[in-house]
Image (cartoon, rainbow, N blue to C red):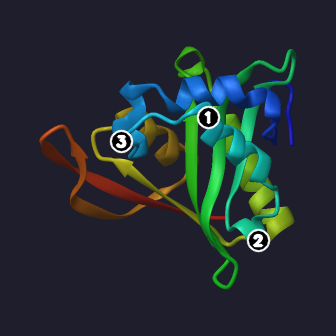
Amino acid sequence: MHNDIITLRALEPTDLDTLYEWENDASLWAVTDTVAPYSRKVLWQYLENSTTDIYTNRALRLMIVSTADGTPMGTIDFFNYDPLNNRAELGLFIAAEHRGKGVGRQALELLCDYARNHIGMRQLHICVGADNEPCLKLFSDYGFVQAGVLKDWIKRGREYRDAVILQYFL
């Protein structure tokens, strides 16, 4: 899956260092619900055992890279895939240096097309911190609609923040 700017591809063993850096960035842990660093061994095992079979794994994680030179720009994934109801939860991460440049929107376009035309999904949903304005704007501008608010859902330090559930019909 690609356009002139980005390509979505399967994870490769060569992505280990990039994933290690991204997954262990403590400034992102509040968004990803991570509470401890990942070891290289754990990430290596994940890469070794990861397949692109969404039906078996109920998940599919893809690397977002520059079409021009293959530079990693982020990841996008389906998880909690429900083949009976043709829906999945969506995850999106864009590396800091690539944010605000349309990479997230382009990744959404490619992934939504794939979900609709190759997997036969009917809908996607995402849970976003109510204070994550750039993410809420991206998904809202793309056509995701608010389906609900989860009160005091996300712990940030000693406080709890609301989360917004957004839904998109393919």
Q: Secondary structure at mark 2?
A: helix
Image vertical order of residue 85 relative to residue 72, above or below: below
Q: Secondary structure at mark 1?
A: helix
Within the image, what quadrant is residue 124 found in?
bottom right
Say left or right for 164 vs 152. right
Q: Are marks 3 and 1 in contact (CB under 8 Å)?
A: no
Eye-nearest disc, 3 or 2: 3
Image disc number at residue 5: none
Q: Residues within 10 Å of mark 3 (few under 14, many from 20)?
A: few
- Give, as a three-letter code, the residue at label 3: Val
Say left or right for 158 vs 138. left
Q: Earlier in the sequence, mark 1 or mark 2?
A: 2
Whole-Å distance between the Cαs marked 3 and 1?
25 Å
Identify residue for label 2: 56
Whole-Å distance between the Cαs marked 1 and 2?
26 Å
Q: Residues within 10 Å of mark 1 (few under 14, many from 20)?
A: many
Identify residue for label 1: 104
Point out the image quarter for the N terminus.
top right
Identify residue for label 3: 35
Whole-Å distance between the Cαs marked 3 and 2?
27 Å
- Give, as a three-letter code, the residue at label 1: Gly
